[in-house]
Amino acid sequence: MPTSVIAPSAGRAEGISSHGRRRRRLLVGFAVAAVALVAVSVLSLMVGARTIAPADVLDALFHYRPGDPEHLVVIGSRLPRTLLGLAAGLALGLSGTVMQGLSRNPLADPGILGVNFGASLAVVVAIAYLGVTSASGYVWFAFAGAALASALVYAVSSAGREGATPIKLAIAGAAVSAALGSLITAVLLTSRVSLDAMRFWQVGALAGRTFDVFWQVLPTLVVGAVIALGLGRVLNGLALGDDVARGLGQR
């Protein structure tokens, strides 16, 4: 009798201890990542065609003087570039996490659901036939194309009794991506201007970016981040499997 009482207590204590260790490792990992992020950001402000000392970088950030050439370089050129790089990394990380949660595939990325090719096709069509040339215009067409491609992939993978399983999502995504890629090539072959604009848009660059571009992309990034964070509970439920997720009230 005493053994049966002690054993569960010991198991609970071990579970609590294991949870505490995982939590500490997670906090340490976050702390290390935060320090590394700050260090890389400072290096991005320091290093370039002309290296600027850390003290001068901090002086430019907190005591900006428009007449100082080094301050102009830091605030006018390197700071927007750094902020855009951080924003792009955040967006890629969030989108990859959401895709992995929805597809229950730890190797998933936006391309697995046709998002990349759907966005690219919409932008190519907008450039070739609608005369869109601004970054803000590209964003909305990319959103629309990505949403339509994702809906198509989900519809194809949902066919059958089992519904949209991770394997079917991956196969449907590959098939739809291949089809959309063919359409992109067909459009690009008819327009040299579209080809040049598409290559620049698809590869991307941070050089020469200003705060105007950063303020254009910031609202969409904030909205997307809020939606992604709000889906955290749903994604955790999906990670437990369909039956458990339905038992928790998710559909």
Image (cartoon, helix red, strand yellow):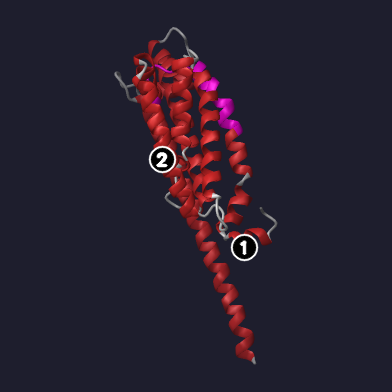
Residue 209 belongs to magenta span: yes
What's the amino acid at mark 2? Ala
How many C-alpha atoms fall within 10 Å of the one at disc 2: few (<14), some, or many (≥20)? Answer: few
Residue topped by disc 2: 36
Q: Are marks 2 and 1 in contact (CB under 8 Å)?
A: no
Residue topped by disc 1: 243
User: Left or right: where does residue 169 sit relative to residue 185?
Assistant: right
Can the viewer see residue 16 in this picture? yes
State the SS at label 2: helix
Q: Quadrant of the N terminus?
A: bottom right
Q: Is 112 in front, or is 206?
A: 112
User: Left or right: where does residue 4 sit relative to residue 188?
Assistant: right
Vertical order, 28 against 51 (above or below): below
Separation of marks 2 and 1 at Cα, in angstroms: 40 Å
Vertical order, 67 against 243 (above or below): above
How would you classify the magenta stretch by its main secondary structure?
Answer: helix
How many C-alpha atoms fall within 10 Å of the one at disc 1: few (<14), some, or many (≥20)? Answer: few
Residue 214 screen position, x and y as percent: 51, 22
Residue 141 screen position, x and y as percent: 53, 24
Q: Residue at x 49, y 21 (%)?
A: 138
State the SS at label 1: helix
What's the amino acid at mark 1? Asp
Q: Residue at x 59, y 59 (%)?
A: 242
Q: Is 234 in front, or is 214?
A: 234
Q: Residue furthest left?
A: 49
Q: Residue at x 30, y 18 (%)?
A: 50
Q: Residue furthest bottom?
A: 1
Q: Residue at x 63, y 90 (%)?
A: 2
Residue 179 screen position, x and y as percent: 41, 36
Q: Which residues are magenta?
A: 202-223
Vertical order, 124 against 5 (above or below): above
Vertical order, 244 against 106 (above or below): below
